[in-house]
């Protein structure tokens, strides 16, 4: 159910309360129940804490998945393409200088004011660096890029220092990498194959490149003693030009390459990881939800038993079953909503602007920020209300159908 549907349901219920006698009675019974919550502190805490824990776990894990997806979506788009040497993975691709030159001349690639094709031939490396969070070493991606890489990528912006100069042993560091790894400040030097490289700038991009160090591709290739590149990133004249580029590359017998839009490439590369995170989030939340549901049921039945005499008196003086059912379910829903809000607040406090990272099949860690969006909060609240409704309905039905004579004898 979306927020509009939920609002419509609330409006419908409010109309029923305002327009019917049973609605007025249900609210009156609810007030009686709420007035006794202070006498049932333990039961109240069990429901609120249990549901809050479910929501906090669900929102936290989903925010990690959403943050990773957002970073990858920002990295790729439909107006840039990545060309690889028949491999599906950039780290396993090898392109010669001759192949790069052929690719740059392919129809569909725009040129700048000086007549140069807007492409960036790129090479990859990795450094082992200490992380700030654990003190352990992790992979830091090192990317050599061509002179047109800013025109190709578009969203890279220097926020401190300056751009590296081609031909020199200079690097710029992504803000994400700088947050995660130690000793990546301006003016610090890194050893790459016994060569000293200086960090001269910090950049932001809001995408996967922010997890890396960037430098001149040819200079880095020389440091790694390579004569090849891993990929060519191409800026397309229009999104529709991708088909022309792909067809032209396929028709060139000098090339046997794999070309995809960067959006497809980056999303496909981690689709399995994202699905795994979402599955884990759902499974853990479901397991905890079952526990919270049984807790709510147990507390609900205990509460009904404790209030048996009170409910019997209400029914004996003419209160019908519907208001009793509605009042008990509403009471549980209110406690569940409180637990949901507390769970969301806990997740927000722990993971708002939290930096996460992944490693695995890629060369370096992919650094991203958890995405605490309103949609996730609504998802968490829906889980809370669903648990509250299911946990309150059965005890409410029992209270409404409990024999009055038996209830009056209950202690």
Image (spheres, rainbow, N blue to C red):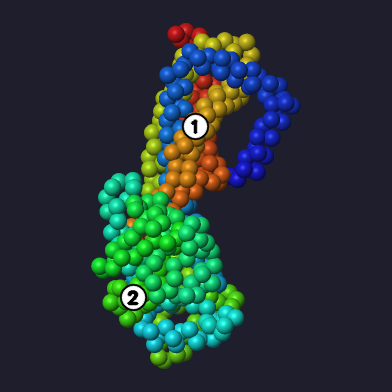
Rounded to the nearest whole Å, what is the CA distance between mark 1 and mark 2?
52 Å
* Residue plotted at (42% across, 30% down): 50
**For residue 39, side relative to residue 35 (left or right):** left
Image quadrant where residue 167 sits: bottom left
> Residue at coordinates 52% horizontally, 72% vertically from top-left?
152
Q: Front-most of 72 and 132?
A: 132
Which of label 1 and label 2 is nearer to you? Answer: 2
In this view, which residue lies farthest toward the bottom?
A: 253
Residue at 60 percent across and 76 percent down: it is 238
Tell me if mark 2 has few (under 14), some (14-19) or many (20+) residues whose alpha carbon lies within 10 angstroms of its own: some
Residue 264 horizontal/vertical position (percent): 47, 68
x and y percent of residue 273 in the render? 38, 57
Q: Is residue 221 left or right of residue 44?
A: left
| Position of 108 relative to 206 (above/below) | below
| Residue 221, numbered label | 2
Which quarter shows the N terminus?
Answer: top right
- The picture places residue 390, in percent across and down from the top left corner, at 49, 33
Please give the residue where the numbered disc 1 appears in the rendered image.
342
Task: Label 2, secondary structure: give it.
Answer: helix
């Amino acid at each position: 159910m979306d927020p509009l549907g939920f609002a419509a349901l609330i409006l419908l219920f409010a109309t029923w309360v305002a327009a019917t006698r049973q609605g007025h009675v249900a609210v009156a019974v609810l007030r009686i129940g709420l007035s006794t919550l202070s006498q049932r502190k333990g039961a109240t805490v069990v429901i609120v804490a249990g549901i809050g824990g479910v929501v906090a776990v669900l929102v936290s894990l989903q925010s990690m998945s959403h943050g990773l997806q957002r970073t990858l979506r920002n990295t790729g788009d439909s107006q840039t393409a990545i060309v690889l040497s028949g491999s599906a993975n950039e780290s396993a691709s090898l392109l010669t200088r001759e192949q790069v030159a052929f690719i740059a001349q392919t129809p569909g690639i725009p040129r700048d004011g000086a007549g140069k094709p807007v492409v960036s031939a790129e090479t990859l490396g990795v450094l082992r660096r200490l992380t700030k969070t654990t003190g352990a070493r992790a992979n830091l991606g090192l990317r050599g890029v061509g002179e047109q890489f800013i025109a190709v990528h578009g969203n890279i912006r220097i926020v401190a220092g300056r751009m590296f100069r081609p031909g020199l042993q200079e690097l710029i560091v992504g803000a994400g990498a700088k947050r995660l790894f130690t000793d990546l400040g301006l003016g610090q030097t890194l050893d790459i194959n016994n060569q000293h490289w200086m960090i001269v700038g910090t950049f932001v991009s809001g995408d996967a490149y922010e997890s890396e160090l960037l430098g001149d591709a040819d200079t880095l290739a020389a440091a790694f003693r390579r004569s090849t590149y891993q990929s060519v990133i191409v800026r397309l004249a229009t999104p529709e030009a991708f088909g022309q580029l792909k067809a032209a590359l396929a028709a060139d017998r000098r090339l046997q390459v794999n070309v995809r839009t960067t959006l497809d490439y980056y999303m496909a590369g981690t689709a399995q990881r994202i699905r795994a995170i979402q599955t884990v989030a759902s499974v853990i939340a479901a397991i905890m939800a079952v526990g919270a549901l049984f807790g709510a049921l147990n507390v609900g039945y205990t509460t009904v038993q404790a209030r048996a005499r009170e409910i019997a008196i209400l029914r004996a003086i003419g209160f019908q079953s519907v208001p009793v059912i509605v009042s008990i379910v509403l009471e549980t829903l209110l406690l569940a909503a409180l637990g949901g809000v507390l769970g969301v607040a806990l997740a927000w406090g722990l993971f708002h602007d939290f930096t996460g990272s992944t490693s695995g099949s890629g060369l370096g860690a992919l650094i991203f920020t958890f995405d605490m969006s309103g949609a996730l909060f609504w998802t968490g609240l829906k889980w809370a209300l669903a648990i509250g409704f299911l946990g309150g309905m059965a005890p409410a039905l029992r209270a409404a159908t409990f024999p009055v004579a038996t209830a009056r004898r209950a202690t």
